[in-house]
Image (spheres, coloured by chain):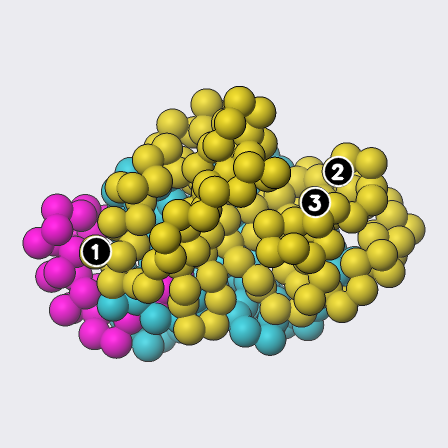
Chain colours: A cyan, B yellow
Amino acid sequence: MIGRLNHVAIAVPDLEAATATYRDVLGAKVSDPVPQPAHGVTVVFVELPNTKIELLHPLGEKSPIQGFLDKNASGGIHHVCYEVDDIVAARDKLKTEGMRVLGDGEPKIGAHDKPVLFLHPKDFNGTLVELEQA
Amino acid sequence: MIGRLNHVAIAVPDLEAATATYRDVLGAKVSDPVPQPAHGVTVVFVELPNTKIELLHPLGEKSPIQGFLDKNASGGIHHVCYEVDDIVAARDKLKTEGMRVLGDGEPKIGAHDKPVLFLHPKDFNGTLVELEQA
């Protein structure tokens, strides 16, 4: 069912410093910061040859990553995102297997303008998993 | 400097259950468990089209991931591994930039029989980073 690893998302307390680390110290290609008000984050995309790292920083007052940064002041890996061909079929299969889909269980339009779902970390070895329709 | 994302490592408290989740629920291709006594882990490789997920379970009494599981009972993402062309050149550049290399700073032979180094999570947004010579 799952295909490519679309990205690894890392929540960071200082977006400029994190971008500099990836660009200047690790020598990776990074994007400009992309504000995504609908998702409560500003994102810098780190382009690797086979996948992306997404550096996430809170934007606005209801950012979904603020609580994570409150608990992890230095930042940390927030989630991994796997691609699926058909997100509704994937959702139905996961529910049949007893896995918990976060929210109301309906795919939302995610940060890449594609349908996404998030899965409960307790069902996936403490890992927040995003599924994105490829 | 950094190239491909070689793998994302997830520490898991129950290797059989985690393998079943990735194989049967997420429908991914998984390996048999590979004991790596020299590294204190048993690993199941989850093969994705563009990278790998490595499910790590403690092996032996001095496993480097036991402490992580003691703090994170459900498991969690333990580290990310980036490939570099020349690990000694990478190490020297990182030290020049003030980044902390774990251990004695000398590359060790890692789980894929290639030289690896680990970098201090506090210098990389709370993320334990492994570098592996490609």
Question: Measuring 33% from the left and 35% from the top, which residue is drawn there?
Answer: B14
Considering depth in this image, is B18 or A111 the residue closer to the camera? B18
On the image, the x and y values in percent for residue A50 come to 54, 73
Mark earlier in primary sequence (1, 2): 1
Question: Measuring 25% from the left and 68% from the top, which residue is drawn there?
Answer: A1
Q: Amino acid at mark 1?
A: Val
Classify mark 1: helix, strand or loop.
helix
Residue B87 drawn above or below residue B61: below
Residue assigned mark 1: B25
Q: Chain of mark 2?
A: B
Residue assigned mark 2: B102
Confirm or deny contact between disc 3 and disc 2 (CB under 8 A): yes
Mark earlier in primary sequence (1, 3): 1
> Is B114 covered by the magenta stretch?
no
Classify mark 2: helix, strand or loop.
loop
What distance separates the C-alpha of mark 3 from that of mark 2? 6 Å
In the image, A128: left or right of A106?
right
Q: Residues within 10 Å of mark 3 (few under 14, many from 20)?
A: many
Q: Amino acid at mark 2?
A: Leu
Question: Measuring 48% from the left and 32% from the top, which residue is drawn there?
Answer: B59
Classify mark 3: helix, strand or loop.
strand
Residue B112 drawn above or below residue B55: below
Residue assigned mark 3: B118
In the image, A5: left or right of A46?
left
Stretch in magenta: A79-107
On whether disc 1 and disc 2 are found on a single subunit, the reply is yes
Mark earlier in primary sequence (3, 2): 2
In the image, A23: left or right of B10?
right
In the image, A13: left or right of B96?
left
On the image, the x and y values in percent for residue B101 come to 78, 42
